[in-house]
Image (cartoon, helix red, strand yellow):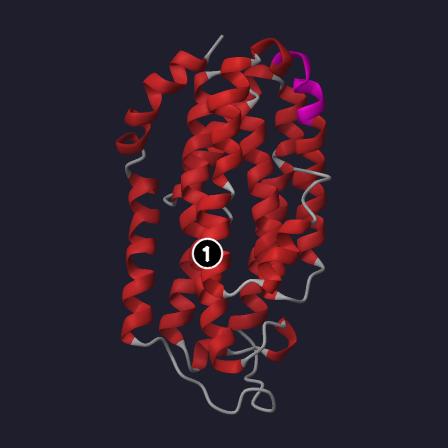
Amino acid sequence: MFPFHIWLPEAHVEAPTVGSVLLAGILLKLGVYGFLRFSFVLFPDACLFYSPLVYLLSILGVVYASLTAIRQTDMKRIVAYSSVAHMNMVTLGIFSFNVIGFEGALLQSLSHGFVAGGMFLLIGILYSRYHSRFIYYYGGLVHTMPVFCSFFLIFTLANIALPGTSSFVGEFLILVGIYKNNVFVCSLSALGVILCGSYSLWLYNRVVFGNLKIEYTASFKDLSEREFMVLLPIAFFIFVMGFYPSVFLAYFHFSCSALVF
């Protein structure tokens, strides 16, 4: 959460691909677990008392992280700041104090693990081939790496919460939960959805389309069979969660209902 988020982009940039995937897919979810398992159970009155402060910090985190992501040149930093914005949305859903917000926060946390993990895997694949994560060195990859660009498009659209993907269901439930509690906070947090589309599509456009920059990348190689088989189940779960969210929400419902006070 803002302003304690500065470590995350630095950790992602310095970490290897596997470390970034584990950090985005598992470790970031421990904070959500801590809020739901400990804060709301042990200190419900304190959670209600400090909820305006959490709303303020979360909205600042969503807007600030999104605006910061737009001006980054390192692909890992863009996805890392995107993670900051999404996890602040999850925090808003948790502090909506209703079942819809709780379920949306849990589903968005689960979805973020797949989407951000897939994005970091794709960036790691590029880095293993060309040894650079700077956007300026890439362009026109759709001409030489069509399978890679197809997966990149799936994860990018999932990152901006396109209907039919897992993130859409999670963010929609979060916004509905916030709206039931505070309309003004919901309106401000919805800015994160618009800004997320800005930097995600900008990243995809710069890397995939345009002219090939052969002065920086002399040879091109599409996804190997091993890389394809790693990315395929992640994309599969993104669409399963997008089209059949009730499969996951059925497990969340009773636990979330017990937390409402």
| Residue at 71% across, 49% down | 67
Locate residue 74 relative to residue 90 in the image: left or right. Answer: right
Q: Which amino acid is tagged 1?
A: Val
| Residue at 46% across, 56% down | 21
Circle count: 1
**Residue 82 at what x, y percent from top left?**
59, 50
- Judge whether residue 250 is colored magenta: no
Front residue of 235/143: it is: 235
Q: Is residue 47 visible?
A: yes
Q: The N terminus is located in which quarter?
A: top right
| Residue at 50% across, 21% down | 38
**Residue 2 at what x, y percent from top left?**
70, 38
| Residue at 40% across, 83% down | 221
Q: Is residue 135 above or below residue 119?
A: below
Front residue of 129/172: it is: 129
Q: Quadrant of residue 223?
A: bottom left
> What's drawn in magenta, residue-wise?
48-55
Packing grade of label 1 (10 A; few <14, some 14-19, many >=20) is many
**Residue 116 at what x, y percent from top left?**
48, 52
Q: Is residue 120 above or below residue 251?
A: below
- Judge whether residue 51 is colored magenta: yes
Q: Which residue is mark 1?
A: 21
Helix, strand or loop under label 1: helix
Locate residue 60 relative to residue 43 in the image: left or right. Answer: right
**Residue 146 at what x, y percent from top left?**
38, 75
Q: Is residue 158 visible?
A: no
